[in-house]
Image (cartoon, rainbow, N blue to C red):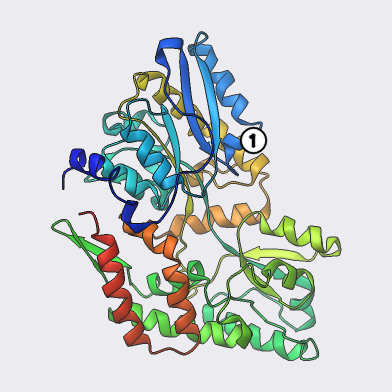
Amino acid sequence: MNRARWRHALTAVPVLALALTACGGGSGGSASSDGTLTVWMMTGGPGDSPLIKDVDAEFAKKYPDMKVDVQIQQWDGIATKITTALAGGNPPDIVEMGNTQTPLQTYSGGLADLTADKSTFEDSAGWLSGLATPSTYDGKLYAAPLYGGTKVVMYNKKLFTAAGITRLPTTIGELQQDCGKLAAANKNVANFSGFYLPGQYWFNGMPFLFAKGGTIATRKNGAWQAQMSSPANQAGLAAWRTFQNTCSTRSSVGVNTDSPDQDQLFADGKAAMEYVKAWEPAAVLQKNPALKDDIGFFALPGYTADAPMPVIVSGSTIGIAADSPDKKPAEDWLRIITGKAFQQEMALKLDLLPISPDFTPAGVPEQLAVASQAAKNSHPLPNSPGEATLETERYNEQFFSKIAAGGDIAKASADYDKHATAAFNALH
């Protein structure tokens, strides 16, 4: 199906069976007739902070007579809402999208082609692949990365010292040994984990596959084929299960990071390590301020000391509506928010990962500095709208939980390949 047909088809059917509904937010509508640039940005990101005024102020130097109307959107139902808006006759000029939702829009025909101007975006050659890959379709650029995020290991220094651990692990094998030392030193602590790792935490599981040389899916002649049954992925799943079962509690195999709250477990001394986003250390300190000087960070080590585990970069991208009558000013606004000056301000004040490692400034929190280095070895998710379908279904969470609980790896992987392949090809 070509992009033009995609665009109309997506407004007529549920988006890849996402079962999402339009949510509240701004009214939308580009309004070049009254000199307004309408921007949809998501809650929790830079658009939802006072920093966005700095972008608008810089933009006003070149476009003093143009108003910028930033409208904050909620995540629930946003994929359908953006798709519908971009296919309508009066779309917002600029839209922010989650990186796994971006392929839905790049395939749809609703976004403007930025390919010819990619080099005019600052350090576009250094964009993180987890954000740059979903921004492209058939070699053409339809969005720009906005901000990133990835996970690092947070550890309790005091618990490490008490367990006799004098240096950070350099391989996953050493990390598992440290889990054993920590468990022995804390045997009187009920439900203690050396490394608390919920079984549903697929953002931790997938890197074990990538480090073995695996990939989630491949695309050939326009068709996707999930690859969970490949030898590399089978080996990675076995290694991840061993790690999860060795380092975390048995009760963790069927849960996610929120129930129970992994940050509360760390704050209570029931976990010596966990895999965290950049904002989670602050959440831990709110629960237990006494840990202020006892928290450290390191990248998840790999199978060998010379190669840490690849990471999945999450985050947002930002694009321009194909039907926007204000493409030139919209593109200039994008250059400001994706440029080094704003990206550094965003990192320092919002703890968000810049879109290029070279943008990461000195003085960011330790976890963000570690994440920036780890992100240099990242692995993108499949550049298909079907990835959003799997996330909406929480299919990856269910799959990894099944593996952690001792499920048959070969059978679960075959089921995964069948289901994921159908999702990846749903609108091809």
Query: Observer-nearest residue: 417 or 245?
Result: 417
Q: x and y percent of residue 150 in the render?
A: 53, 57
Q: Which residue is mark 1?
A: 49
Quarter-of-image position of residue 345: top right
Task: Give the image location of residue 298, x and y in percent.
Answer: 61, 65
Q: From where the camera sits, is residue 264 visible?
A: yes
- Residue most extreme to the left: 221
Q: Residue at x 25, y 59 (%)?
A: 426
Please name whichever residue, 291 or 170, is drawn nearer the observer in this view of the structure: 291
Residue 241's spot in the image, x, y percent?
Answer: 48, 84
User: In the rendered view, does 235 fall on the left or right side of 184?
Assistant: left
When the figure is inspected, residue 245 is found, relative to residue 331, above or below; the finding is below
Residue at 72% x, 84% y is: 192
Q: Is residue 177 visible?
A: no
Give the farthest residue toward the right: 290
Answer with the quarter of the image where residue 231 lies: bottom left
Q: Residue at x 52, y 74 (%)?
A: 200
In which quadrant will I find the C terminus?
Answer: bottom left
Q: Amino acid at mark 1?
A: Ser
Tell me residue 351's x, y (percent).
Answer: 64, 47
Q: Nearer the viewer, residue 372 or 324?
A: 324
Mark 1 element type? loop
Left or right: where does residue 92 sit relative to residue 293? left
